[in-house]
Image (cartoon, helix red, strand yellow):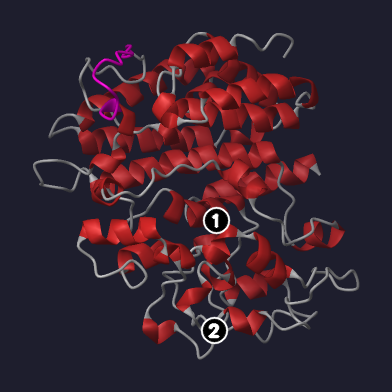
Amino acid sequence: MKSVHVFFISICFLIHLPALGNEIPQYAEKMHMGVATCASGVCHGSIRARSATNVLQNEFVTWSRLDPHSNAYNLLFNEDSRRIARNLGLPNAHEAGVCLDCHADNVPIKRRGPKFQLSDGVGCESCHGGSESYLSSHTDPNQGHAQNIEDGLYPTDDVVARANLCFSCHMGDQNKIASHEIMGAGHPRLSIELDTFTALEPPHYLVDSDYRERKWKEDSVVVWAVGQLQAARKTVLLIEEHLSNRDDRFPELSLFDCHACHHPMSDIKWQQKRTVGLPPGSVRLNDAGLSMILPMVEVLMPEESRTFVTLSRNLHLASSKTIGLARSLEELSIFLDGLEEKLNLISERSKDVMLEILKMGQEGKFRDYVAAEQAVMALDLLLQANGTRGRSENWLDVLYATVENQDRYNPLAFQKAMQGSAGL
């Protein structure tokens, strides 16, 4: 099975983003027929999971009762959303495209079928694609998964495609972003780590022999590593789209680390970082999407680690100027292509990557909250993958406590917690 994983990953990586050439469902051309078309008791609306078919058939019930995505639209009516809308000068949040783009299946009206409802929130077709062409045929036992995808089913089992889909809202893309204006109006900061967020989703599928045969069984380490690489690519894309192409006096500040500015003046915790290189008082980029690249590079391509540090510094330095940013982004993208070619080794080197993250933490390298947050999630899943999470639960609890509140993050306390990991 491992060799199959490596082969699949290698093929997937040669394709680049978006995987298999699929547009995310919001931008694809297929008609969205509405959640109600999936909710029949003989389709995906069974109260209980069934074993006689190759799908559980209770997917709608799982989504509607347990998945926060089903409540995404309703959140636009609460007091927080009303306040944000007022601050933005909008009549309301539940009719504003800037809110609906991520809180609902906000496809154009011409692509909404007769049973489509915005109030369904982030529903089936938000992730699985407009069902216009596959709705009547995807249950045909003679039709394979590849044909369903050709008909418009989005390949969420493909980890690269899944990253592209999830990150489009949880990080942003060329068309939408939780801008500094939106966050200034009261919207919380966004963060994501693909494997952790996938695991937190209530499962509405069963990875059995049939699933493995028709699709792919990825492991957590691969999902994490590919997710980190795609997050880095997304960071490059967002900077290119929303920072380097702007002529405003102030850049799009959501691309920068919130805590570089938003902390008490008496809270003096600045410290130089190899990968940043900016002087005190600088507004530095939010490099959460790049924070786990260095430990992977240290393990998979150690001879290139100094190159990555230089490229990261160049990007931070260029972000504070009006020239040189495009070149820095291009050079970093080329470097990520090189790392991509090495990720077929990630599963067998996962323990080394875990130990590298731990070493960086013990040396106090995670000065920024966004990087510490990513490090904790990475260590959790890597411990699980290496079979040592059980004996590390107490230590993980302490580690999670240090990143529980971003406003009270103390890098020295985080470093001390990292140093309490004896025996890993």
Position of 248 relative to 290 (above/below): below
| Residue 179 appears left or right of 393 | left
Q: Residue at x 59, y 16 (%)?
A: 358
Residue 59 belongs to the span the image colors magenta: no
* Kind of element beneath mark 2: loop
**Residue 147, image x and y in percent?**
66, 75
Q: Residue at x 74, y 32 (%)?
A: 385
In the picture of the structure, the residue carrying the numbered disc 1 is 161
The kind of residue tagged 2 is Met
Task: Write down the region rendered in magenta.
Answer: 260-272
In-front residue for pair 155/335: 155
Q: Residue at x 62, y 55 (%)?
A: 158
Position of 148 relative to 185 (above/below): below
Earlier in the chain: of badge 2 and badge 1, it is 2
The kind of residue tagged 1 is Ala
Outermost residue to the bottom: 114
